[in-house]
Image (cartoon, helix red, strand yellow):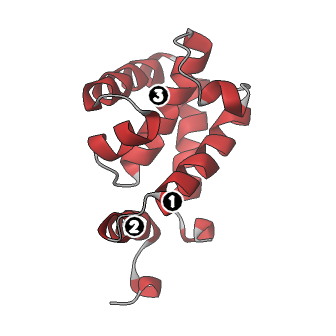
């Protein structure tokens, strides 16, 4: 099966698997930074702050959003954890907190949904 026949969400997962098979994380890291670059302005934070280790809530929730988008694209917990230099359980916690925030904050939910839609549709095939 060639890559043009794979739906976009599965394409991202397939690209990750191929990158992993080739022992390179560069493609995954690049996509992670690309998604983060979209999350940062959507949440009104600086990209370098989003990618930092800070635990301040105005940064953790955008980070949880980034985790959710990557998880929706089919990345497993360990793959996401490796990008953040976290333990996989921190990713599980972040996804739980993200779900709670989505139930109580419509704007946060809409921003997440908009970005998931962007990366899960054929128009994002770059």
> Residue 42 appears at what percent x and percent y?
69, 34
Which sits in the foreground, 17 or 97? 17
| Percent coordinates x, y for residue 48 in the rendering | 69, 30
Figure quadrant of the N terminus? bottom left
The span from disc 1 to disc 2 (Cα, nearest Å) is 8 Å
User: Considering the numbered disc 2 on the image, is that residue within a helix, a strand or a loop?
Assistant: helix
Instruction: Determine the image quadrant of residue 50.
Output: top right
Quadrant occupied by the C terminus: bottom right
Mark 3 and mark 1: Cα distance apart in space: 22 Å
Give the number of the disc on residue 64: 3
The residue under the point 42% across, 63% down is 24
| C-alpha gap between disc 3 and disc 2 | 24 Å
Q: Name the mark on residue 26.
A: 1
Q: SS for tag 1? A: helix
Task: Say what secondary structure mark 3 lies in.
Answer: helix
* Pointer 3 or 2: first along the chain: 2
Comparing 44 with 90, the one in front is 90
> 88 and 42: which one is in front?
88
Q: Residues within 10 Å of mark 1 (few under 14, many from 20)?
A: few
Residue named by callout 2:
19
Which of the two marks, 3 or 1, is nearer to us in this view? 1
Q: Are marks 1 and 2 in contact (CB under 8 Å)?
A: yes
């Amino acid at each position: 099966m060639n890559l043009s026949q794979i739906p976009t969400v599965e394409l991202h997962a397939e690209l990750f698997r191929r990158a992993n098979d080739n022992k390179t994380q560069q493609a995954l890291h690049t996509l992670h930074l690309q998604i983060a670059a979209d999350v940062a302005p959507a949440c009104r934070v600086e990209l370098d702050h989003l990618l930092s280790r800070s635990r301040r809530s105005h940064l953790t929730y955008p980070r949880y959003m980034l985790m959710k988008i990557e998880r929706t694209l089919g990345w497993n917990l360990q793959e996401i954890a490796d990008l953040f230099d976290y333990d996989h359980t921190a990713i599980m916690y972040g996804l739980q907190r993200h779900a709670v925030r989505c139930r109580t904050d419509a704007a946060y939910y809409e921003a997440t949904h908009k970005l998931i839609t962007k990366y899960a549709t054929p128009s994002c095939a770059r």
